[in-house]
Amino acid sequence: MVMQGFDNSGVKEQFKGGGMTIARWGFVSRIFRMSVALLVMSMLSSCGKAPSEPLRIASSPWPGYEPVYLARDIGYLPREKANIFELPSSDITLESFRNRSADLATLTLDETLELLAGGVKLRILFVMDGSNGGDAVMASPNVKTLADLKGKRVVITNIPLGVYMLSRTLNAAKLTREDVQLISSSESRHAEMYKQGRADVFVSYEPFKSQLAALGAHVIFDSSQIPDEIFDLMVVHEDVFQARRQEVCNVAHQWFRVLEYTKQSPEEATRRIAERLGVSGQEYQAMLSGLSIPTQQENLRLLGGKEPALVAPANNLVQVMMQEGQLKHRVDIRQALDADIEACIVK
């Protein structure tokens, strides 16, 4: 395995391709990423922790998280109830929650398991989405099949989900990490790297996946091939859940309320979200095609009852993460589930 260093050219990007423009900050080195993370966390912490203050919700770019911003923009989650901070990347979101700079956060299931293994006490408030193609390994035209991965330059974002997708892809290709050249880089740099021919394969996710597709990359492996393994969750610190249960549960109520709004007013909802993302309505709908959004009842099936449906895929994920060295010991997702979740999410 060859591990190349971070690319350190450029700080702010604007990617264009196929009619879609997405402006994102590119964090170009681990030192710079950490300095920005500390600054962001300082800003979040300054919002205060008193119960009278708005809940602090940390999130990052991903189509499945967009209803949170829509709920804010149409008044379902007014700023006096919740401050929603859109952070540049998922690793900074993870750290902001880990370091208590946020009360709630949008995290993947693997990130949640990592926190639990590290002793962080939290609750899963609701399942936001399941990835059904939204996470993908994108390849240049010279990489036609999984077998062609051998010896190729593979770009990966250094987050648990990136490592997990790489692992599942290499397993499917019957290859090891020593068979590829790994390059670590922020997801916001992927499109430029592709255009410059500096890598062959990209472990990516929306909206960056669509950017790569617009430039000519194609999917050689995606989350639709590993169903029920990648979930996005809204999580909350255990003590915040206990101390401010009514306010926290209101976030869940407004989530399902805004999902209903998207069904009743699909054109307006799509227009608002697409405008916020800087894409066309058609492009946003294409992103959604790689996601499944659980309803309130489906959330109760996943998180509640005697046998929560989330337990089995979480256990499978734990096994893979232990094999990859991402977890040092087993984690039981049940410790993050609320036995009385129905009373919280059903108004």
Image (cartoon, rainbow, N blue to C red):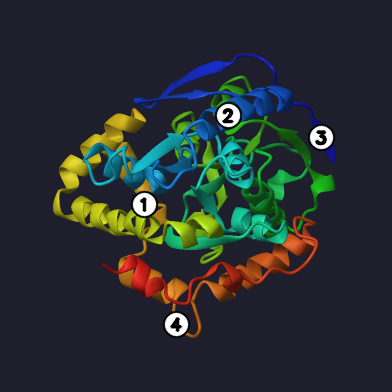
Query: Circles 2 and 3: CB distance less than 8 Å?
Result: no
Mark 3 residue type: Met
Residue occupying image coordinates x 21% and y 43%: 269
Q: Which residue is mark 4?
A: 305
Label 2: how many residues lie within 10 Å, few (<14), some (14-19) or many (20+)? Answer: few
Q: Which residue is disc 1 drawn over? A: 289
Residue position for label 2: 42
Label 1 vs label 4, nearer the camera: 4
Kind of residue at badge 1? Ser
Q: Residue furthest bottom?
A: 306
Q: Residue at x 48, y 71 (%)?
A: 338
Identity of the residue drawn at 58% across and 73% down: 334
Quarter of the rendering containing residue 75: top left
290 sits left or right of 72 in the view: right
Instruction: Say which label, 1 or 4, has the lower sequence index.
Output: 1
Lower position in the chain sequence, tag 3 or tag 1: 3
Task: Specify the quadrant that holds the N terminus.
Answer: top right
Is residue 217 visible to the viewer in this orientation of the structure? yes
Nearer-the-camera pick, 299 or 230: 299
* Mark 3, residue position: 3
